[in-house]
Image (cartoon, rainbow, N blue to C red):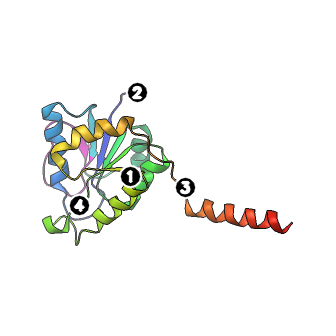
Amino acid sequence: MERYIFATVGSGKIPFNRLIEKVDIAIERGTMPFPVFAQTGAATYQPKHFLYTPYLPKEQFDEKVRNCEVLVTHGGVGSIMSAIYAGKPVVVCPRLGTMGENVDDHQIEIAETFVRENLVMICRDEDDLGEIVERSRNHKFEQYKSGNQYAVQLINRFLQREC
């Protein structure tokens, strides 16, 4: 199976051309460690150096996440969590409200929350995208612990003390 990086901008209606263009530039510069396949969503920028499709059905999206080396994504929780659950390195490039890519800058807050937990890396300067993707491949991320699992562990500890 071919090794690749999967890039996604989500399925929203607002284009995220900046990320798609920066992936193209990283490939052109030779800093992207593997070929790229992308879900470009509403983007109007046409990639020159990688394969893409505007949208993927959920099953195909999940398959791309499972089989990729690294997920490069916007700051959408669904995209981030799909890669974390699959145990894949994640590089988040948040959409910015100040650039008209979203209604506000909440994706920065989402990305920073995941960074604090050492679950993802954030790309604040897209000119460094290829290098950050490469670093993410060897970074030791924390393993995600679901809040549900934590609650079950607490209940089990409580029950063990009571019995």
Point out which mark residue 57 bears.
Answer: 1
Q: Residue at 18% of width from left, 50% of height from top?
A: 125
- Residue 79 visible somewhere in the drawing: no
Q: Which image quadrant for residue 156? A: bottom right
Dot 3 falls on a residue whose secondary structure is loop
Q: Residues within 10 Å of mark 2 (few under 14, many from 20)?
A: few
Q: Is residue 161 above or below residue 1?
A: below
Q: Position of residue 12 (x, y in %)?
A: 27, 63
Of badges 1 and 4, nearer the viewer stands 4
**To which residue does mark 4 refer?**
95
Which tag, 3 or 4, sits closer to the chain's start? 4
Please name whichever residue, 32 or 127, is drawn nearer the observer in this view of the structure.
127
158 displayed left or right of 90:
right
| Three-letter code, disc 1 | Pro
Q: Residues within 10 Å of mark 1 (few under 14, many from 20)?
A: few
Please name whichever residue, 115 or 20, is drawn nearer the observer in this view of the structure.
115
Q: CA distance from mark 3 to mark 2?
A: 30 Å
- In magenta, the rendered stretch is 39-53
| Three-letter code, disc 3 | Lys
Quadrant housing the N terminus? top left
| Three-letter code, disc 4 | Arg
Dot 4 falls on a residue whose secondary structure is loop
Q: Is residue 72 above or below residue 153?
A: above
Dot 2 falls on a residue whose secondary structure is loop
| Residue contact between numbered discs 3 and 2, judged by CB atoms under 8 Å | no
Q: CA distance from mark 3 to mark 1?
A: 27 Å
Which tag, 2 or 4, sits closer to the chain's start? 2
Q: CA distance from mark 2 to mark 4?
A: 31 Å
- Residue 161 visible somewhere in the drawing: yes
**To which residue does mark 3 refer?**
145
